[in-house]
Amino acid sequence: MKWKNALKDYQLYLKIERGLSQNSIENYSHDVEKLINYLEHHKINESPITITTEIVQGFIYEAAKNVNARSQSRLISGLRSFFSYLIFEDYRASNPLELIESPKIGRKLPDTLSEDEIDTIINAIDLSKPEGERNRAMLETLYGCGLRVSELVNLKISDLFFDEGFIKVTGKGDKQRFVPIIEITQKYINIYKNEIRNHLNIQAGHEDTLFLNRRGKQLTRAMIFTIIKRLAEKIGLKKNISPHTFRHSFATHLLKNDADLRSIQLMLGHESITTTEIYVHIDKSHLTEVVEKYHPRK
């Protein structure tokens, strides 16, 4: 079995059997490609079936010199998944990653913005330019609905159910969920949609895409990152923020205002509530207030 054939089959498995998004498939594939490049560079002639734990260990040891513990752990996890697939398909009897331990890493708490910081960022948008209304609507949607950046750029006009107070969001693995959308966010989307988007020369295939670039095509994830980075620089914000920061802030602010974790989990589209529980660790002062307010021994 050749590496490229094995990788192609693995990609099909991730797409069809596990229903992963294209971004996730690319990340998993990249881990395997790094191993393939290592073997070619060192002229190691081993196939996916014959490669040993010792060879994989050598690769990880070399990779560890250039990446942090979190990236190293991610690489090991990705390769372990690839070889587990080969076992699943009866190509191998054992996983060469079985005895390789991932480095211990602390649980990384997400960066968040205060309500004032979010207001300052959004108020810094230049509304005199057509893209200003679009950018305001996008950031209000990121923060108001807790979307991932991929969910934002893929949002369709047909996904908007404003009369019912919801939007339909397509998340990881093409799983759909309905997320409440507040009136202020609806207002800014309608302003953009009716006053700016209507005047664009919309390209074929993008007629239903909500947020468009000046050429009438779907925005890229990278463009959303750039917009947010520039706004942060404009207001002199020292935090390292991204589109995901607005999603984290959405969940954190809901939690501070006594929303329950199960509701937050559903709105974020988390498979497991343990993923949502990370927000509990963000603001210990809030938990102290809860105990002081509700505990019978207070």
Image (cartoon, rainbow, N blue to C red):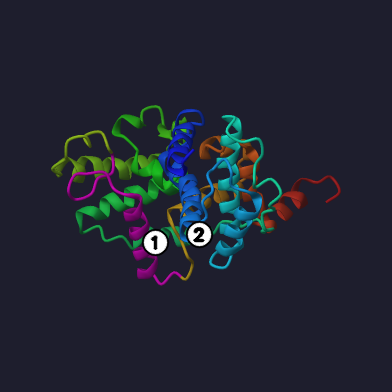
Residue 166 picture quarter:
top left
Q: Label 2 belongs to which residue?
A: 113
Q: Three-letter amino acid code at disc 2?
A: Leu
Q: Label 1 belongs to which residue?
A: 121
Magenta segment includes 259: no
The answer for how far apart the CA atoms under marks 1 and 2 are is 10 Å
For disc 2, the neighbor class at 10 Å (few under 14, some 14 to 19, many from 20) is some
Can you give x and y, in whole percent of width and height, for residue 115 in the image? 49, 57
Magenta segment includes 217: yes
Report if residue 228 is visible in the image. Answer: yes
> Magenta segment, which residues?
210-237
For disc 1, the neighbor class at 10 Å (few under 14, some 14 to 19, many from 20) is many
Secondary element type, mark 2: loop
Can you give x and y, in whole percent of width and height, for residue 117 in the image? 46, 62
Residue 128 picture quarter:
bottom left
Above/below status of 18 relative to 289:
above
Above/below status of 123 relative to 49:
below
Residue 184 picture quarter:
top left
In the displayed structure image, the side of residue 179 where residue 253 appears, left or right: right
Contact flag, marks 1 and 2 (Cβ < 8 Å) = yes
Residue at the spot x=42%, y=34% of the render? 170
Between 264 and 38, the residue placed more toward the observer is 38
Can you give x and y, in whole percent of width and height, for residue 44 in the image? 52, 55
Secondary element type, mark 1: helix
Can you give x and y, in whole percent of width and height, for residue 18 in the image? 51, 31
In the displayed structure image, the side of residue 24 where residue 69 appears, left or right: right
Between 28 and 295, the residue placed more toward the observer is 28
Q: Earlier in the sequence, mark 1 or mark 2?
A: 2
Q: Three-letter amino acid code at disc 1?
A: Ile
